[in-house]
Image (cartoon, rainbow, N blue to C red):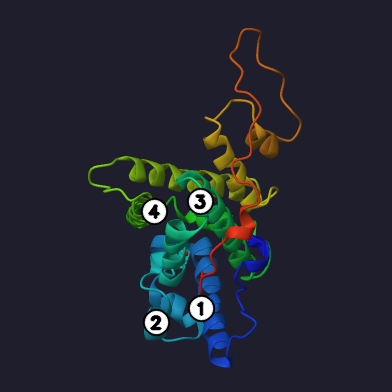
């Protein structure tokens, strides 16, 4: 079974009526919140404003999101735990970088699908979130959120590698790099209007990372279109990109939910 075919649907086929209603409510709250924040600015929208616009009580809002910031981050403990478990157990025998590439490329596909399910162009929602992140109040919350993500990634990678993250810097270094890849590709994707699928950008970015970030490579070709001129004579060649993940789809560990 492929990664694409195993990607969790936002309406799982065997979900109960109660689960479908909860998912619809969560989606509706997030849609309304993003629209309000885009219109007024993050600092000028309260949880009460969102609740009124979504026709729910503030208490119901907090049943789905722990904070106003979480609406933008799409924070879901079940998804975060799925990623952590997959980083530990997926693709046995492959490197930590390879599993990061496979798992986070799949997560990028899920993120784009979640935004698409809000209705309209998913890149438009991403662009609205990107604009909201210019707010100083949100920046601080985002920094805290990303620190938690990095810590979770580092802990999972350390467990996978059988090492102590307090003594071995490699898991945190790789986790920090991975979150930077996600931030950069998401920002580019939103700014470019989603002209390239997010999961392709993430996959190509991890390939570039594995290749040592060559100046001329598949990532920049994917983003800019026509190939660029060859580097001047005498410039060291980065070589042809070599695939890092080869048919990893068949080895994915299935988990129950999706960060």
Q: CA distance from mark 1 to mark 2?
A: 9 Å
* Residue 41 shows in this picture: no
Mark 3 or mark 4: whose residue is earlier in sequence:
3
Q: Determine the residue positioned at 53% across, 36% down.
A: 210
Secondary element at tag 1 = helix
Q: Is residue 137 left or right of residue 5?
A: left
Q: CA distance from mark 3 to mark 4?
A: 10 Å
Q: CA distance from mark 4 to mark 1?
A: 33 Å
Mark 1 or mark 3: whose residue is earlier in sequence:
1
Q: Determine the residue positioned at 63% across, 57% down.
A: 249
Instruction: Reply above or below: 166 against 108.
Output: above
Secondary element at tag 2 = helix
**Which is nearer the eye, 98 or 8?**
98
Give residue 63's mark: 2
Give residue 160's mark: 4
Q: Is residue 215 left or right of residue 157?
A: right
Secondary element at tag 3 = helix
Q: Determine the residue positioned at 45% across, 80% down.
A: 51
Q: CA distance from mark 4 to mark 2?
A: 33 Å
* Residue 246 shows in this picture: yes
List the residue tagged with mark 3: 99
Q: Residues within 10 Å of mark 4 (few under 14, many from 20)?
A: some
Q: CA distance from mark 1 to mark 3?
A: 30 Å
Instruction: Reply above or below: 33 against 54.
Output: above
List the residue tagged with mark 1: 26
Q: Determine the residue positioned at 52% across, 85% down.
A: 22
How far across and how far down the image is residue 73, in percent? 45, 62
Secondary element at tag 4 = helix
Q: Are marks 3 and 4 in contact (CB under 8 Å)?
A: yes
How far across and how far down the image is residue 169, in percent? 30, 40
């Amino acid at each position: 079974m492929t990664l694409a075919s195993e990607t969790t649907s936002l309406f799982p086929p065997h979900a109960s009526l109660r689960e479908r209603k909860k998912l619809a409510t969560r989606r509706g709250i997030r849609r309304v919140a993003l629209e309000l924040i885009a219109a007024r600015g993050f600092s000028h929208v309260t949880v009460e404003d969102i609740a009124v616009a979504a026709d729910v009580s503030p208490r119901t809002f907090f049943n789905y999101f722990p904070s106003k910031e979480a609406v933008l981050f799409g924070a879901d403990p079940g998804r975060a735990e799925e990623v952590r478990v997959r980083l530990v157990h997926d693709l046995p025998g492959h490197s930590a970088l390879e599993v990061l590439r496979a798992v986070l490329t799949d997560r990028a596909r899920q993120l784009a699908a979640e935004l698409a399910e809000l209705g309209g162009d998913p890149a438009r929602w991403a662009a609205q979130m990107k604009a909201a992140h210019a707010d100083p109040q949100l920046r601080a919350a985002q920094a805290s959120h990303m620190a938690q993500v990095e810590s979770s990634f580092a802990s999972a990678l350390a467990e996978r590698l059988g090492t102590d993250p307090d003594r071995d810097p490699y898991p945190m270094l790789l986790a920090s790099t991975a979150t930077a890849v996600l931030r950069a590709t998401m920002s580019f994707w939103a700014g470019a209007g989603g002209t390239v699928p997010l999961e392709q950008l993430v996959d190509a970015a991890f390939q570039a990372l594995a290749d040592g970030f060559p100046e001329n490579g598949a990532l920049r070709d994917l983003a800019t279109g026509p190939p660029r001129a060859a580097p001047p004579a005498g410039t060291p060649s980065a070589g042809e990109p070599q695939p890092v993940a080869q048919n990893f789809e068949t080895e994915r560990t299935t988990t129950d939910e999706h960060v």
